[in-house]
Amino acid sequence: MPTSSPPQSRPGVVILGTGGTIAGSTAAALGHHYTAGVLSIEELLASAPGLADIAQLRCQQLFSLDSVELDLPRQLQLARRVAQIAADPDVDGVVITHGTDTMEESAYLLHLLVGTDKPVVLTGAMRPADAPGADGPANILDAVTVAASPAAHGLGTLVVFGGAVHSGREVSKRISSRLDAFDSFHGPLGDVSEQGLLLYGRPARRFGADSAFELASLPESLPSVELLLSHPDMPASICRAILDSGAAGIVHAGPGGGNVATPVARMLDEARERGVVVVRSSRVGAGVVARNGAVSDTEHGWVAAGDLNPFKARVLLALALTQTSDVATIQRLFDTH
Ligand code: SIN
């Protein structure tokens, strides 16, 4: 009598929709270019056949927004929802569909705050769901493959895009218009291929449960941190407006290795005198801003961003300021997270 092996149970994956171009529609745009975040997560999943063979899926919709609207309070809300989903013993991994524009900020925030060992995977698309050659279905398939993979445990938050697997800390949107929009300065952690997830690296810095931050003890909103993208002709009035905005922190994005023009440096020194924490980063987009490299951070009392781009530095500074405004302590947080 033929024996049949017991049915293999597929991993449980929750897909959490937040909007973005992946849920965008050209047809719904009524004369505009397109509208982000109009399709439900269920409609998106219908466009990616084969998902049910990889995992047992459940869907939730948190937002239906263009990711430019995902400010820090909403990103925190997302982190809290992901932590709650991941705590369910029936869940093996979480996929978040998200707009590409601010995915790098959400990915870093989640990477720092969500303490689960289970894979948390963000993905999105550069083309709306109803555009020719839409990239969303393949990205969702890849993201679910990674979220369902035991090998992806213990890697923190990942971004899966265009077949590459990036760490949430490293990834950034480097190209505003192409399908291969994302890259990581130190390279992706892996690929999704016909063989499934192939890994080549692991995150080197503190994250998740090992980070200095605890999601449960954070306030509803984080201290305000402004970004000062600087150039040689920057009028003092712009600097002054940022200084007077009441921000608890300023991330300066300067040319090259985080260089600071003399009038801007004066303003940043004044910010320090008022107790505002200043982080020095680079507007180049990739590379290292070394402490006491282009400028003496020690002399000015500034923090060097290291390899974090200005947007990620803003996220880390906002979290750091919930604990301290001591510059040496914040520099250590930047050196280790
Ligand atoms: C967005 O970030 O929500 C719009 C752009 C995109 O998803 O590519």
Image (cartoon, rainbow, N blue to C red):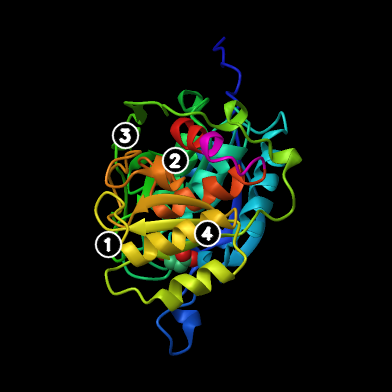
Queried whether the magenta region covers residue 77, the answer comes back as no
Mark 1 vs ligand 1: CB under 8 Å?
no
The span picked out in magenta is 323-330
Camera-side residue: 317 or 95? 317
Q: Between marks 2 and 4, how big is the CA–CA gap? A: 28 Å
Count of number-bearing discs = 4
* Residue matched to label 3: 194
Within 10 Å of disc 3 (Cα), the crowding (few <14, some 14-19, many 20+) is few
Residue found 47% across the figure and 45% down from its top: 301
Image quarter (top left, top right, bottom left or bottom right) of the N terminus? top right
Could you tell which of marks 1 and 3 lies nearer the N-terminus?
Answer: 1
Camera-side residue: 189 or 282? 282
| Mark 4: amino acid | Ala
In the rendered image, residue 148, in percent from the top left (x then y), is placed at: 52, 33
* Residue matched to label 4: 271
Could you tell which of marks 2 and 1 lies nearer the N-terminus?
Answer: 2
Q: Between marks 4 and 1, how big is the CA–CA gap? A: 39 Å
Q: Between marks 1 and 3, how big is the CA–CA gap? A: 23 Å
Q: Which mark is residue 169?
A: 2
Asked if marks 2 and 4 touch (Cβ < 8 Å), the reply is no
